[in-house]
Amino acid sequence: MRKAVIAGNWKMHMTCEETRVFAAAFRPLIEDLPADRQVVIAPPFTSIPTLSRHLAGAGVSVAAQNVHWEEKGAYTGMISAAMLVEHGVSHAIVGHSEPRKYYSETDEQINLRARTAQRHGLIPILCVGESLDQRESSETERVIHRQIEQGLHAVDPSSLIVAYEPIWAIGTGKTCAAEEANRICGLIRGWVGHDDVIVQYGGSVTPATIDDLMGQSDIDGVLVGGASLDPLSFGRIANYQAPAG
Ligand code: 13P
């Protein structure tokens, strides 16, 4: 049985003070979480110590929003896996569509990031997904297959999360229909070739859509942007109620 992973990606939001306020409100909301799920939050690097301290003992894992592929060196502005591990970080998002778009990250670089993360015991959360143009020209499967194949070269699938994040659904309020998200997540599982890999859906997930998404057979969790910034919304998402079956 795969354990669901409910992850929040805070992107460039949340100062330390805002993180402290979030943690105080969020902690009671996840006190009675069923054992079939795990909560992960990816704050900005500067808020990692505050989040860890204020949610200590609450069962929340801390993720980084990226990680560099080199051990150390002249890479201004970057962060290494060892620096993250030192702060108790357990997961690292790699290949998110925003760094792919704004900083021209390639599948090769993303692959190196995932491998370095694993070398340090971090679980990579590899994001994949098609643009609206690619979907409309029927390239969805080809694009995601390539991202999986190149992104996961020499990556251990037993310590991995893949997040299907269609770019047209990110921050737009347009959630991918649950059945279609499930179909793509099933394809991803097949391409990864490891039945137990956690495959998440991400893109405008809200308290209104979570139960339907988590009721799908191949969706093992979600990667939530905007709705993870509000403790009440993210608390409701973490407490999703999937129909039995
Ligand atoms: P939204 O939930 O704001 O659409 O963001 C999704 C996302 O990019 C998570 O990584």
Image (spheres, grey):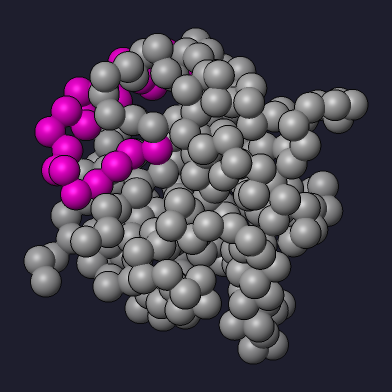
Q: Which residue is nearer to you in this view: 130 or 90?
A: 90
Q: Position of residue 98 (x, y in %)?
A: 69, 50
Q: Is residue 26 above or below residue 123?
A: above
Q: Position of residue 233 (x, y in %)?
A: 32, 39
Q: Which residues are magenta?
A: 18-40
Left or right, 40 with respect to 212, comes to: right
What residue is rendered at 20% in x and 23% in y?
28
Q: Is residue 213 visible?
A: yes
What residue is rendered at 50% in x and 14% in y?
49
Q: Is residue 172 visible?
A: no
Q: Residue lying farthest left?
A: 244
Left or right, 79 with respect to 119, comes to: right
Quadrant location of residue 70? top right
What residue is rendered at 51% in x and 38% in y?
121
Is residue 46 shown in magenta? no
Left or right, 171 with respect to 139, comes to: left
Quadrant for the C terminus, please.
Answer: bottom left
Q: Position of residue 243 (x, y in %)?
A: 13, 65
Q: Which residue is nearer to you in this view: 175 or 216?
A: 216
Q: Is residue 123 above or below residue 32?
A: below
Quadrant for the N terminus, please.
Answer: bottom left
